[in-house]
Image: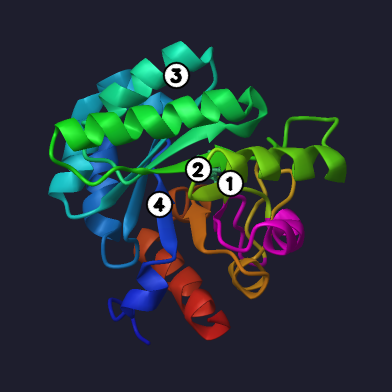
Amino acid sequence: MTLNEVNEETRSRMALALDVDDLVEAGRLGRRLFPWFSVAKVGLELFAASGPEAVGTFIDQGYQVFLDLKLHDIPNTVGKTARVLGSLGVSYVTVHSSGGIDMLKAAVDGLNEGATAAGLTPPMVLGVSVLTSEKSATPEKLQERISNVVAADCGGIVCAASDLLLVREQAPELLSVVPGIRPEGVSNNDQGRPATPSTAIQEGAGLLVIGRAVTASADLEQAANAIALEVSDAL
Ligand code: C5P
């Protein structure tokens, strides 16, 4: 595989984290990196800056949009918010699994309602398992969060690569979405539990979330291509 020749199976496993506060810059990154990534992740920073316009920008570029707002509130508020988000045409929305089954269910129902009313396919809810900043994350806590996600009929879970074994054992049907991806020799930044692209794929990751390993690189295309090569070899 050479530059710009990425197979679809590899591309389908790669989500680009657009953690910037400027939609013009994010849009430029999206256009340049489209050959390697099928999913564009819009997080709190970009959504705070540009809101639904950011979502539309990446849908127009041909991406599936992953809206990473990590919702966590009372079920009524999450449900009503999810109804709005469901009408935007996004493919994935994150919700904190620590919010409990009722809240997760409210998100699933709200997204389904909003999407159906707009004539769209409902987004998949991804339950956030544990944040790396959460100091008291134990295997028991992770198990409880996984069972919340399953009980609420979420389609997927966000977890560290090191948690994939437990997720696979307990809920193999979930799409596992893994941030903290760092090729050998690339700075960990603030990632508490990083993994290389090949390790994450070998451990069973469904979708890799890749941010600064590419976006902070001096050569975006080269960095994306090196990761894609590693993913392709590991598949
Ligand atoms: O570190 P990187 O730039 O690849 O981050 C990509 C995504 O990983 C971020 O958008 C954030 O959602 C997530 N992240 C995380 N834990 C951290 C830092 C970032 O899960 N400690």
State how far apart marks 3 and 4 are (Cα). 25 Å
Closer to the N terminus: mark 4 or mark 1?
4
State how far apart marks 4 and 1 are (Cα). 15 Å
Question: At x 50% / y 43%, what residue is drawn?
Answer: 126
Q: Alpha-carbon neighbours of circle 2 within 10 Å: few (<14), some, or many (≥20)?
A: many
Please, what secondary structure does the residue beneath circle 4 have? strand
Label number found at residue 16 = 4
- Label 4 sits on what residue type? Leu
Mark 3 or mark 1, which is nearer to you? 3
- Please state the extent of the stretch shown in magenta in the rendering: 161-184
Closer to the N terminus: mark 3 or mark 2?
3
Q: Nearer the viewer, residue 202 or 185?
A: 202
User: What residue sits right under mark 3 in the picture?
Assistant: 78
- Ligand 1 within 8 angstroms of badge 1 C-beta: yes
Please, what secondary structure does the residue beneath circle 2 have? strand
Mark 2 or mark 4, which is nearer to you? 2
Q: Nearer the viewer, residue 183 or 204?
A: 204
- Label 1 sits on what residue type? Val
Label number found at residue 138 = none
User: What residue sits right under mark 2 in the picture?
Assistant: 126
Question: At x 17% / y 39%, what residue is drawn?
Answer: 57
- Label 3 sits on what residue type? Val
**Does residue 177 show up magenta in the picture?**
yes
Decide if residue 23 is in sight here. no
